[in-house]
Amino acid sequence: MSSISTSQTLNAHGGTSSGGTPEFVNHGLLLWNQTRQQWVGNKKDENRPARVLEPRLSWNATYESLLGSNKRFSQRVPLAEMVDFLVDIWEQEGMYD
């Protein structure tokens, strides 16, 4: 399936080398790896303990108080927290069985 011959080897830059031919550099792969590194961050951060975030939604929030208007929230609400909130509401109303 690969177009790289068996005499060629893949190098760390996504290029190939085979003796006398010029080295191919896969600039797309280089850019992808650079962008991915920005997304995943530095591996050194794995040793740092994870921060426990306080919930953004009040424990007594209602569907109407949060979503009854088109006003923006004062701070961002993590997706997982909003999904948990909605599932709880839907379960209470019998909409999520």
Image (tube, rainbow, N blue to C red):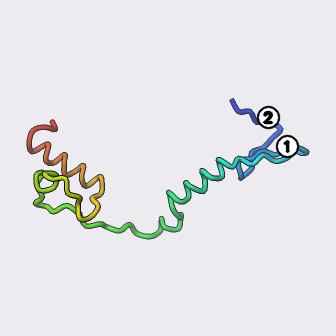
CA separation, marks 1 and 2?
9 Å
Q: Is residue 53 left or right of residue 87?
A: right
Please, which residue is most extreme toward the front here? 70
Q: Which residue is mark 2?
A: 5
Q: Is residue 37 left or right of residue 3?
A: left
Please, which residue is most extreme toward the right here? 20
Classify 62 as above or below 6. Answer: below
| Callout 1 amino acid | Ser
Count residues near mark 1 (Cα–Cα under 10 Å), then give few for <14, some for 14-19, many for 20+: few
Q: Earlier in the sequence, mark 1 or mark 2?
A: 2
Q: Which residue is mark 1?
A: 18
On residue 47, the disc is none
Q: How many marks?
A: 2
| Callout 2 amino acid | Ser
Q: Secondary structure at mark 2?
A: loop
Q: Is residue 34 left or right of residue 90?
A: right
Q: Are marks 1 and 2 in contact (CB under 8 Å)?
A: yes
Q: Secondary structure at mark 1?
A: loop
Residue 84 position, x and y percent, is 22, 50
Q: Quadrant of the C terminus?
A: top left
Query: Who is closer to the viewer here, 54 or 25?
Result: 25
Residue 85 position, x and y percent, is 19, 52
- What residue is at 47 percent from the left and 68 percent from the top? 47
Query: Who is closer to the viewer here, 93 or 44?
Result: 93
- What residue is at 10 percent from the left and 52 percent from the top? 64
Q: Quadrant of the N terminus?
A: top right
Q: Quadrant of residue 81?
A: bottom left
Residue 20 position, x and y percent, is 91, 45
Count residues near mark 2 (Cα–Cα under 10 Å), then give few for <14, some for 14-19, many for 20+: few
- What residue is at 85 percent from the left and 43 percent from the top? 18
